[in-house]
């Protein structure tokens, strides 16, 4: 896709419940509404040339989603962001559009924030202790079965902070190969911290993308 | 809420927030309406009527109409566990705080879901148990042409097309509330609005055999409520700026309604009688609205919808006009429910240049004799000819729909279904363009359900046992293995017949069935015949009385206080013609004076 345009967008609020597959349809329709033609693939079943990087799990928010698409006439106007934002459902907002200079495969880390809700005052010392270990193996369910992830390798800067009604978690998590979702932190806590209480609910939000040198990815 | 949504399937259907949903500032709104569809989001959002009413109501700046759908069982359970009352999608506010709750009722099997939704809203299901402070609960839609089974639960019914009558009722309600009037006083006034039926103002008595002996109305209520219709359909509201769901629904596309009503007069078809007269939009209007709706929604498909789409006079200019826009914009055009005539297949060819979806024809009966009885004017040669054109054009998937248990049906008629299917098969063998791919031919049968306001309203339904006998007769007559035979269960059709022809007493059955765990009965996984039968037994009512009994012609029908504008005499004449096997010409060939012309003088049939 050498004429591709990259869009940085956010998916927050109610739109967090739109699944990845539904998001693709939703964006396609938003493009049509905004009268922006997306180039279609050739072949028997033409489909719009549009890819969303790193599928966001259902229920998660994000302020750093990335989508590449090929506009029919090669470029987008200055009004593109405004026009699109008038055509999107609640919670999805385009932030920037630009010519991509790097491949999506270079994304190494995602900074993620989480909030675990508790009704009783939680304790975080043991969690901090846990993430100082040199090996934190956890099981990750995938379509093909269960795989082993070592959070000591595939997560960085895991921090916990007590706040009103719960714990705030921040972490840099491996974006791909393997993909580490923040609920694995919770899994690790449940596995290694004795009597770790399950939170009432867990909310997550992707904050920023980084490459392998911890530089912001765009 | 997050925790609840994360524990249920497809949470996006409970959040609202879709593109084009209407959100208003409560400070500027005087009346809040919960427009309820007693089925899931995916079904309800696919309903054009819902989209029209939503648009019509929200055009009024002082009204805020929001959508409410039935939660799936997992969500319902979560809501009950967490004490979360039924809420509207746009605001998330509990609907028990609204002024009006309005149900759109399209099919009988949704009745228990209505009760479920009222209960989930935190309101008593029975009219008599609700106070003046609670919302007014009303209903409209096709099944309300016999409102009687739901009269225990609904304060007021809209008879006819909602875009006409509903707002008049809402306005009156607001005035009455402001004046501090009671609900009862309001209802008395509302009964004076044409097209409004207030069941509490009518009294029904029964004779020893259980038949209705008299229906009487209180002062001020009309003896007969006549449906309201949109007079100028070409200029009626069409939702150009319609909501675009962010999750997949059943009919995920723009739906264009070409006309209301139907010229044909099939004698079993309730829609064909209650939506008379035919009122069409101009092709220019439809082309304009279709394109605007596609531009406004971003949908990649548009479909033409009406009772008998190929009867639309301007079909070719309309299709051409739409295709001119659709093709360069990667939008596809689809046509459902076509008649088995050459014209339709030509049209299919024109429209579906690349994608060859399956064809569906509904001859309904196997012999010409029985097709004459039901006034389905499709000739065998027309059907075979259409099939030939389709097969030559490369189609290789065909579905044929029939009904079993139609009045006067004999074993010969049943066997003739198999013969007809075999003829279709040999037509394919003769002229298929692509024989190597084989033909997928499906024959489907359902059990005939007599419906109010049709010439067959008096007929009894055959018993489930008899239906199954005819099913196996047909099955053994279908010799070719290339034909797949599907038959609908008789169980739902029996209950559908009970509810369709039910009187007021059936309300108790609906309530019992619901209390015993009913709800979402339109879904086979939640329907239970046993639950319905024990509910009937509990209430001392016999399903055979409602479903299988032939109603004597002179008897008072439960829906006698409602008219769709077609006279009772006409229906009776049509019934007699059916039994004599005499066909009635369609409205375009000849007006046979069904009464519509006199009831709605300002409207010209099929202009
Ligand atoms: S009045 Fe005549 S033309 Fe009009 S709907 Fe009735 S039969 Fe048809």
Image (cartoon, rainbow, N blue to C red):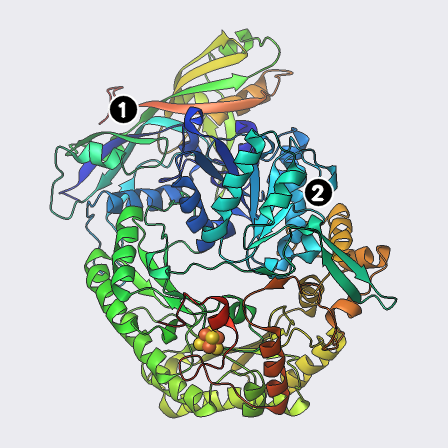
Instruction: Name the quadrant of the N terminus of chain A.
Output: top left
Instruction: Identify the residue at image location x=15%, y=33%.
Output: A79
**Residue B264 x %, y %:** 47, 78
Relative to residue B162, is residue A124 depicted above or below? Answer: above
Above or below B173: residue B513: below
- Left or right: residue A25 versus residue A158 is left
Q: Total label count?
A: 2
Q: Which residue is drawn at 76% across and 46% down?
A: B515
Front residue of this view, candidates A7 and B452: B452
Pointer 2 indicates a residue of which chain? Answer: B
Which residue is under mark 1? A212
Task: Name the image quarter holding residue B322.
Answer: bottom left
Using the rendered image of the protein, determine whether residue B292 is visible from the camera's viewpoint.
Answer: yes
Number of other residues with Cα within 10 Å of mark 1, as a class: few under 14, some 14 to 19, many 20 or more: few
Q: Where is residue B444 in the image (x, y as percent from the top left)?
A: 56, 75
Q: Is residue A213 above or below residue B220?
A: above
Tell me if mark 2 has few (under 14), some (14-19) or many (20+) residues whose alpha carbon lies within 10 angstroms of its own: some
Q: With B528 as the anchor, is B51 left or right in this view?
A: left
Front residue of B120/A193: it is B120
Identify the residue position indicated by label 2 in the image.
B127
Give residue A42's quadrant in the image: bottom left
Q: Residue A115, image x and y in percent? A: 48, 18
Residue B361 makes an appearance in the image = no
Q: Which of marks 1 and 2 is in front?
A: 2
């Amino acid at each position: 896709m050498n004429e591709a345009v990259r869009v940085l967008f956010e998916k927050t609020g109610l739109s967090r419940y739109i699944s990845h597959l539904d998001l693709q349809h939703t964006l396609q329709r938003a493009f049509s509404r905004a009268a922006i033609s997306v180039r279609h693939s050739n072949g028997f079943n033409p489909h719009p040339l549009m890819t969303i990087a790193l599928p966001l799990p259902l229920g998660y928010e994000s302020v750093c989603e990335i989508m590449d698409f090929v506009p029919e006439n090669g470029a987008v106007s200055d009004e593109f962001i405004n026009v699109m934002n008038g055509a999107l459902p609640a919670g999805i907002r385009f932030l920037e559009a630009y010519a991509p200079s790097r491949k999506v495969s270079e994304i190494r880390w995602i900074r993620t924030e989480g909030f675990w809700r508790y009704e009783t005052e939680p304790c975080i010392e043991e969690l901090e202790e846990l993430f100082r270990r040199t090996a934190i193996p956890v099981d990750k369910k995938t379509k093909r079965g269960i795989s082993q992830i070592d959070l000591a390798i595939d997560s960085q800067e895991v921090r916990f902070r007590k706040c009103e009604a719960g714990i705030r978690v921040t972490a840099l998590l491996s974006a791909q190969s393997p993909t580490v979702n923040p609920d694995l932190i919770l899994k690790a806590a449940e596995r290694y911290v004795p009597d770790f209480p399950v939170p009432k609910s867990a909310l997550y939000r992707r904050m920023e993308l980084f490459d392998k040198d911890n530089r912001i990815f765009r | 809420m997050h925790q609840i949504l994360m524990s249920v399937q497809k949470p996006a259907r409970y959040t609202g927030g879709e593109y084009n949903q209407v959100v208003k500032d409560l400070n500027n709104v005087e009346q809040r309406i919960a427009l309820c569809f007693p089925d899931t989001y995916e079904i309800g959002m696919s309903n054009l009527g819902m989209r029209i009413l939503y648009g019509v109501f929200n055009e009024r700046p002082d009204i805020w109409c929001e959508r409410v759908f039935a939660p799936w069982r997992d969500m319902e359970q979560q809501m009950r566990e967490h004490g979360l009352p039924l809420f509207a999608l746009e605001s998330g506010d509990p609907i028990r705080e609204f002024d009006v709750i309005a149900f759109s009722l399209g099919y009988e099997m949704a009745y228990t879901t209505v009760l479920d939704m009222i209960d989930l809203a935190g309101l008593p299901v029975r009219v008599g148990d609700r106070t003046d402070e609670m919302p007014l609960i009303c209903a409209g839609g096709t099944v309300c042409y016999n409102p009687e089974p739901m009269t225990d639960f609904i304060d007021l019914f809209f008879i006819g097309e909602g875009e006409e009558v509903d707002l008049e009722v809402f306005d009156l309600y607001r005035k009455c509330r402001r004046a501090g009037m009671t609900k009862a006083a309001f209802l008395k006034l509302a009964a004076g609005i044409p097209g409004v039926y207030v069941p509490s103002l009518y009294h029904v008595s029964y004779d020893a055999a259980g038949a209705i002996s008299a229906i009487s109305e209180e002062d001020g209520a009309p003896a007969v409520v006549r449906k309201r219709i949109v007079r100028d359909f070409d200029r009626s509201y069409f939702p150009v700026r319609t909501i675009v769901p962010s999750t997949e629904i059943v009919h995920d596309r723009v739906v264009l309604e070409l006309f209301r009503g139907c010229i044909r007069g099939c004698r079993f078809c309730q829609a064909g009688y209650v939506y008379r007269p035919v009122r069409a939009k101009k092709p220019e209007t439809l082309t304009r609205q279709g394109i605007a709706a596609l531009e406004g929604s971003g949908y990649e498909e548009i479909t033409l919808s009406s009772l008998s789409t190929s009867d639309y006079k301007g079909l070719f200019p309309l299709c051409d006009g739409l295709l001119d826009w659709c093709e360069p914009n990667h939008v596809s055009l689809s046509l459902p429910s076509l008649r088995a005539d050459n014209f339709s297949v030509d049209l299919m060819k024109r429209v579906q240049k690349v994608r060859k979806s399956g064809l569906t024809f509904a001859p309904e009966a196997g012999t010409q004799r029985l097709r004459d009885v039901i006034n389905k004017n499709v000739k065998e040669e027309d059907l075979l000819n259409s099939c030939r054109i389709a097969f030559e054009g490369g189609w290789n998937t065909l579905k044929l729909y029939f009904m079993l248990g139609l009045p006067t049906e004999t074993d010969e008629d049943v066997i003739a279904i198999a013969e007809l299917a075999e003829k279709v098969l040999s037509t394919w063998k003769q002229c298929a363009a692509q024989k190597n791919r084989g033909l997928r031919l499906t024959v489907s049968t359902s059990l005939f359900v007599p419906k109010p306001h049709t010439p067959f309203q008096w007929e009894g339904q055959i018993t489930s046992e008899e239906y199954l006998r005819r099913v196996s007769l047909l099955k053994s007559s279908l010799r070719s293995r290339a034909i797949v035979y599907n038959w609908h269960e008789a169980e739902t059709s029996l209950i559908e017949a009970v509810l369709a022809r039910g009187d007021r007493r059936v309300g108790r059955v609906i309530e019992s069935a619901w209390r015993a765990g009913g709800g979402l009965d339109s879904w086979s996984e939640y329907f239970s015949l046993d639950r319905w039968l024990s509910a009937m037994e509990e209430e001392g009512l016999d399903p055979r009385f409602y479903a299988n009994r032939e109603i004597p012609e002179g008897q008072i029908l439960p829906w006698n206080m409602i008219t769709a504008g077609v006279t009772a005499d006409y229906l009776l004449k049509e019934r007699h013609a059916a039994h004599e096997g005499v066909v009635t010409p369609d409205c375009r060939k000849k007006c046979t004076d069904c009464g519509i012309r006199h009831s709605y003088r300002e409207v010209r049939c099929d202009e």
